[in-house]
Amino acid sequence: MLVDQDRAWFHSQFLALCVRKTSFDWQDFVTDLMHMKHGPEFVQIDPAGRGDKGCDGWVDGLMLACYGATSPSESYVTSKIKTDFENAERHWGSRMEKWAFVYNNARGLPTMAAAGIMDLRQAKKSSSVKIENWPPQVLWDYCVGDDVDRSKLAWILGAPPSEHPAGMSYIARCVESLARTRLVPDTDSPLEVPPGKIEHNNFGVEVADLLVAFKVHTGHVRYYFSLASPGEQAQVSENLRARYDGHRARLGSSDAVFHALCDDLVTEAFPGADYPDMSQQRSAAMMVVTHFFETCDIFEAPVSE
């Protein structure tokens, strides 16, 4: 069973990855989750050669059609829904009892594409095949739900943070992965977090709770910088802000940006096996990102009236 912090992290990281995964990365993400759920019962189709014939995966009569896009075209998605279903129906026939259109936008489908699902259901009302609509919320409930193997989920989504603060060596690795050159020290005192900054950035409840939880530990990051070389905090802040701006422009979602920044630090700071505790790695990354959230170097502060 997962503790509350683990569940909050896993679920918010899952939704953040749904925003970030597109095209074949999205299909691979979905099939990894289905393998976790069904093991050897799940059949993955290799699209090389003769193609997948409208099937991105199959288990117990359930046929998957995966679609991941950053900015979907309404007409293209509508056409894809229809053609993917027809290809699967024509080629796989009686092997297909349910057909699920699995997509990465938790806010839903564009209007025309949603109408395409409705029209397809109407047109196939007499068919024995059930047509299903799977946004990320349905994918999570189906593959994860309340009973999950923590180690398997961590293999797909990454290790959740420890409930305890990370050691100083882990924090140092995260900071070193951001620092490249030395700047003149910033003489200004860090700004206090303005009231309402979490709400202003539209964080989800789970990521907001994680920010509050890790705010308790950011004193360890401040202590590190109090002993660091001159200009190190300014350089790290500048580089992290550049990463933030890039993720923000591409992803939009504050939750997805927060998790992307943490993932960047984990990947870059701990590339080898010399730091085996993955929970400590994640904690250190979240402590550093939360520290710079507090100092208002990343994410937007409410405008004072």
Image (cartoon, rainbow, N blue to C red):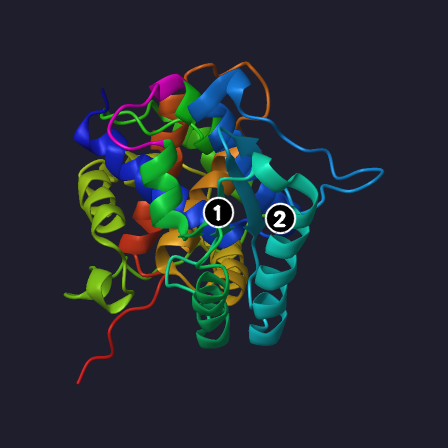
N-term mark: 2 or 1: 2
Residue ID at (54%, 38%): 29
Taking depth in this image into account, of 294 and 32 the one nearest to the observer is 32
| Residue 227 in sight here | no
Measured Cα–Cα span from mark 2 to mark 1: 9 Å
Q: Relative to 177, does residue 65 appear above or below in the rendering? A: below
Q: Residue at x 17, y 39 (%)?
A: 216
Residue with the most extreme bottom position: 305
Residue 232 shown left or right of residue 200 in the figure: right
Q: Secondary structure at mark 2?
A: helix
Which of the two residues, 219 or 41, is positioned nearer the viewer here? 41
* Residue 53 at x, y percent in the picture: 71, 45
Magenta: main secondary structure: loop
Task: Provide the residue designation for mark 1.
Answer: 129
Q: Which residue is mark 2?
A: 89
Q: Which residues are magenta?
A: 144-151
Residue 49 shown left or right of residue 185 in the figure: right
Residue 288 inside the magenta-drawn segment:
no
- Residue type of the residue flagged with mark 1: Val
Question: Helix, strand, or loop for circle 1?
Answer: loop
Q: Quadrant of the C terminus?
A: bottom left
The reply to whether residue 171 is in sight is yes
Quadrant location, the N terminus = top left
